Image (tube, rainbow, N blue to C red):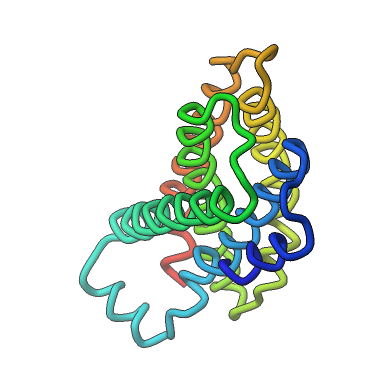
Amino acid sequence: MGATIFVLFMSMEAPEPAVWNGLFWVIQLFICINTVAKSFLTENRGRMLYFFTITSPVSFVLAKLLFNLLLMVVMSLLSLLLFTMFLGNPMVKAPAFIGLVLLGGGSLSLVFTFLSAIAAKAHQNAAIMAVLGFPLIIPQLMVLMKLSTAAFSTEQAIQITDILLLAALDVMVMVLSIILFPFLWKD
């Protein structure tokens, strides 16, 4: 992550706010894929069998979702810090954007944690995450880009309905994980 941001700094010292915003969310997406999405793919069959004997599938998937959510929030804040250090701070509404970074990082982690569980049951096939993930993540990225564009503008207001939509998508992913993971767990 740091190397990527440094390369951006070397290639463009102070990008326009729209470019800064777009680059930030693209890097967040790849950070999430590289850290959070591999959470189930790194578990071997013996460890999963051990977890199967000591906990319920709902507890297990909720723990994975929570851990990855916290991990991605930390990674998002670190990324935001590096972005502002190297590429400047074009945000007009910085506190709102920081809150959006926390919500957006959590949203990305929830989707890719769930997709990681599906990919792990498909015999460690990470390509499944890309095929399933990008169509699922596009609505979230569109809402995040719309909200973050408002954080870079004095004329646009941040819409509470968009924040609620993003939160509703997060709840939907969590509910789907709780409902569907026990079926993956039995395999």
Q: Position of residue 79 (x, y in %)?
A: 53, 55
Identify the residue shown where x is 77% and y is 39%.
16
The residue most toward the left is 54
Identify the residue shown where x is 35% and y is 52%.
66
Q: Is residue 149 left or right of residue 49?
A: right
Q: Position of residue 56 (x, y in %)?
A: 27, 60
Q: Position of residue 59 (x, y in %)?
A: 28, 56
User: Toward the viewer: 46 or 87?
Assistant: 87
Identify the residue shown where x is 21% and y is 71%.
54
Q: Is residue 127 left or right of residue 34?
A: right
- Tell me the quadrant of the picture where the N terminus can be found: bottom right
For residue 20, what is the image quadrant? top right
Whether 161 is drawn above or below 181: the answer is: above
Whether 141 is drawn above or below 71: the answer is: above
Whether 49 is drawn above or below 105: the answer is: below
Whether 159 is drawn above or below 180: the answer is: above
Q: Is residue 125 left or right of residue 73?
A: right
